[in-house]
Image (cartoon, rainbow, N blue to C red):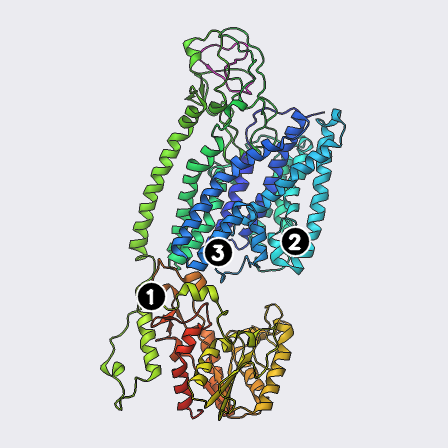
Amino acid sequence: MNIPTSPHPTPRRDIQGLRALAVVAVIGAHAAGWPRGGFVGVDVFFVVSGFLITGALLREIRSTGGIRLAAFAGRRARRILPAALVVLAVTAAIASAIFHRARAEQTLLDALWSAGFAANWRFAALGTDYFHADDAVSPLQHYWSLAVEEQFYLVWPLLLLAVVSLLPAATRRGPRAAVAVGTLAAAAATASFAWALAQSGDAAVAAYFSTLTRAWELAAGAIVATCVPALARMPRALGGTLSWLGLAAIVVAFAVIDPEAAGFPAPWALLPIGATVLVLAGGAAGDPRHRHLFPLTNPVSVAVGDLSYSLYLWHFPVIVFAAVLLPAREASTWLVLGVIGVLALASYHLVERPFRYAPYAAHRATTAPAATVAAVGAPSSTPTPAPDPIPAPDAAPGAGLGPAPGAGLGSRPAGWTPGTRYYPGMTRPVPAAAASPAAATPEPTGATDAVPQAIASTSTSTPARETPAAAAPTTGGIPVASSPWSAWRARFGPPALLAASGLGIAALAVVLVVQNVFGGLSAPPIARPPASAADSAPAADGEPLDPIAALQDELASAASASAWPELHPSLDEVIARSSASNPARDCFSPDITPTAAGCSTGSADAATRIYLVGDSTAMAYAPAFRTLADQSDGGIRVTTVGLYGCRFTDVAVQNDGVGVMAACPQRKADVRAMIAAEEPSLVVMSNAYTLGHTPDGSDLSADALLAAQEAEADAYGLPGRIVHLAPPPEGADLGRCYSPATSPYACAAGVSSTWGQMEAAAEQVAAASGNHAISSLPFTCWELVCPAFAGDIPTRYDKTHLTVAYAEHIAPALRAELVGRGLL
């Protein structure tokens, strides 16, 4: 037997509060890093969505015995697409203006994948690390969760329809349908959770983004939806206790779940999922307003819940763009939060609600043409239900069993008289003098909105007689217009106008704040002390200026530059090509076995033979040493060989690059054999100056790493002929910092303490062994500031690695260093 429900129940305020809590946690985690586990707010959204959508589908099954897939898809499109597409278009346009070309093109591709609700598969395929703060993250990465939901809802109605079609026609509208759907949801949840457990350990990135490993979260909400009739009979005290326990557990999840820990989404997501299930189940009993659950049901939480979809869509692009345009200050975070709020409010009133309720097919939402409408003062016939009585797909469970909102507004219940307000679903008329927003059934808010009555009511056939009082009925105090579009404009026009005005004022305020608080879009450049005449004068013997001094002069000018010069090659080119243009790339690849002959340049009869070995930093120096050989008139032969990601030390240093750890020991052994066979004049070693750990997890200090590097050098049997060449200090990641809209200072970086410790350790081990250590600071930094270019050449293409052009540019300075030490 079906549990009777009101056609237009008051929406559950606790659900809106859940939305508010979830979106605030997500925004806080992304914008400020607090709460640390706030990213699980997405999991809360999944459960709520599965609960609401499945509830709507069950109501349609009870009402019609089936599911109209086209109508379901249309409702989802009206709910999701307008705001989502606007954010995609705006984000792609802004990205093209402020990102470098490679990142802008990447963002455009992300937008196309997101528009097709496949963003999660794209990010999984790219190997995106959702928690890696150093990545040049896509401003549309948050669309992965929207893709998961829509992929689930592409399949879920079909499965429900298939299951229900197996039931006898006479039982499809009864409780058996809910039991069948619940069984299906439980099976889906079990299979998905089992797969999530397997994937979370073996392929964490794929597990995070995959619909298959997330389906159990939506299915958990679906299970609760099938149990609503039974849950509605539980004592209110028990329901309230479950809701409070669930709320507390959600807060605990925000605090204890670590985004960098293993085991997500399974098993750790069980905590927020189970907590949300408790809140939804507990709220099924009692007053939908749930005043006792005030953290979720207060007016502020409900209002934020109304805006939750727009807040979620806008927050990540704003955060990513601000990271490029604004300096990292506490004031920046508050400005970012303010911009997110303004954009969400404007989007809600300008796009989300107007497009969702626009009367594209208002004729479908009216009463049947043959509906009988009573004359004023006469008994009326029962209003004929509209052909589409199902409310928005995410309306609160219990809605939608009666006529569509506004259906039959021309009809009045028996006893109606002019001067009273009538709301569909009311049990009796309420005198106008006594009517108030509190007395009427409140209009659902946010994602639980029902179609506004004024829009759906305009096609009702005209009564035979109508008094002046009845000729202009009102809905919520707004006169019912003569056409659906005029009613739509009357309802949504004023809020949209206010939102547009507020958006313009807010934009002006943001510009003023950026100019006056932040001094523009980037911090001022470093002041360069005036150069002395001795700095720029040529040597007394007519020789050119010392190459190291010339480089320092170029670096000083770059560090004090206020605008990007025209660079050759451009930063767009070097970022896009990365290491692909390095001629030594194959000699450092784990997929290719290098040979001494294939990795050498210069005359085979050269008197001086140099080996450059190490990880990818050595590869970045390779063009400089090859230039030395090319400019030596056959006097120098250089062999550049190593393995990127593999530090040339006598202990293994963990690297997660594909194939690196497997190839590293053999590559070091091959290089030792090459050096033993040729006995070169000089071996230059260069490895990353970052701390690391062994494969078993033991930390390696700066001293331990350089001691291990020196121990590896000892195996070459060339005492006094080893050079420890420091890599460039780690700078700002060009993929994130470079923007044509900001100054070069955004990409200038200081020298880290770790780099300084490792350089000092290199000096110590070299002095103790009689070998040599060369700092890279004279080639890459000025006054401990490392700019992204020198002269008209980009210095690096990412955080550390030199561009080919700049490596070739510093070859004279490297030669001067080696000559000065008597090594050439």
Label 3 crowd (10 A; few <14 / some 14-19 / many >=20): some
Q: Identify the residue shown where x is 28% and y is 72%.
A: 528
* Residue 109 visible: yes
Tell me if I can see residue 258 in this picture: no
Q: Position of residue 75 (x, y in %)?
A: 55, 33
Percent coordinates x, y for residue 741 in the rendering: 35, 57
Q: Is residue 690 above or below residue 317?
A: below
* Kind of residue at badge 1: Glu
Between disc 1 and disc 2, the foreground one is 1
Q: Answer with left or right where residue 669 lies relative to residue 739.
A: right
Secondary structure type for disc 1: loop
* Residue labelled with disc 1: 566
Q: CA distance from mark 3 to mark 2?
A: 30 Å
The local crowd at label 2, few if under 14, some if 14 to 19, many if 20 or more residues have their Cα within 10 Å, is many
- Residue mark closest to the camera, 3 vs 2: 3
Residue under pointer 2: 266
